[in-house]
Image (spheres, helix red, strand yellow):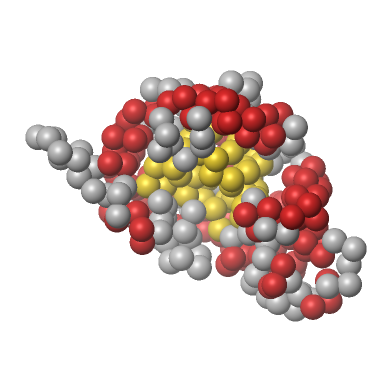
Amino acid sequence: MNRQTLINTIREKKSYLCVGLDTDPAKLPVHLQGEEDPVFAFNKAIIDATLPYCVSYKINTAFYEAQGLKGWESMEKTVNYIPDTHFKIADAKRGDIGNTSTQYAIAFLKNLPFDAITVAPYMGEDSVKPFLQFEGKWAIVLGLTSNPGAADFELKPLAGEAREKLYEKVIRTVAGWGSKENLMFVVGATQSDEFINLRQIAPDHFFLVPGVGAQGGSLEEISLKAMNGEVGLLVNVSRDIIFASGGEDFAKLAGEKARNYAEQMQQYL
């Protein structure tokens, strides 16, 4: 999905909600345990219930890879079930030397129908560039994350007069490796004090913003401080939507949660 199609979808649906499919088999409703593929059965019901209210889905690959071949098959069935009207993200956080990154890029952006993959930029330009070689596909590079450990490195000031923080250096540098057409940045919702600064560093790029809901990030602060003229936001909510209920009404309540988030977003568009 290209940038303009994504923007048009957000405008038409009046939503910039991304539903995170962090599907933990240990949390699935009991009544699904007898299904041939409980994870896919759960995901399918969640997708059916939330499709009208979101523009994107983010599959956290760790929850699938941990289950071995069966988990990978569940992930593949899930991404194929999501219609092309929705932006599909592989939250895989890959990033390695160039020839290895190329194989990761082929796996997720060519052999699977994902529109984007999250990428760790620590190893530099040659580890990110392979993800930028596919037409209509995106690399979503870790910029400033929502976890407490962001303080260990990302928020540390670098030596020199400017006292630039490491995350600032990363985003300024990575922005030059691609363009607003194929690069996004992960910006944690709990980093609200940095949102305005982040927009000054990357005024035109999309931000994928996790951390709303269970992690306590504020949708209002994100929207008021980080939205640009073309919206420029995909706000991800995972546990607060998909595990809204552990009973047989799990999909119904997930849909209601997604609708509530979408209705909140309308006031900021």
Q: Is residue 213 left or right of residue 57?
A: left
Give the total number of marks visible in the rendering. 0
Residue 29 found in image quarter:
bottom right
Q: Residue at x 29, y 35 (%)?
A: 169
Q: Residue at x 43, y 66 (%)?
A: 216
Q: Position of residue 62 (x, y in %)?
A: 62, 54
Residue 114 or 48: which is nearer the viewer?
114
Q: Is residue 256 left or right of residue 154?
A: right
Q: Is residue 165 left or right of residue 19?
A: left
Residue 188 or 196: which is nearer the viewer?
188
Q: Residue at x 43, y 26 (%)?
A: 125
Residue 174 or 226: which is nearer the viewer?
174
Q: Is residue 126 left or right of residue 19?
A: left
Query: In this picture, is 133 found above or below 266?
Result: above
Residue 160 or 21: which is nearer the viewer?
160
Q: Position of residue 257 (x, y in %)?
A: 62, 65
Query: In this picture, is 213 found above or below 227?
Result: below
Q: Residue at x 67, y 29 (%)?
A: 106
Res. 200 visible in picture? no
Q: Position of residue 248 (x, y in %)?
A: 79, 76
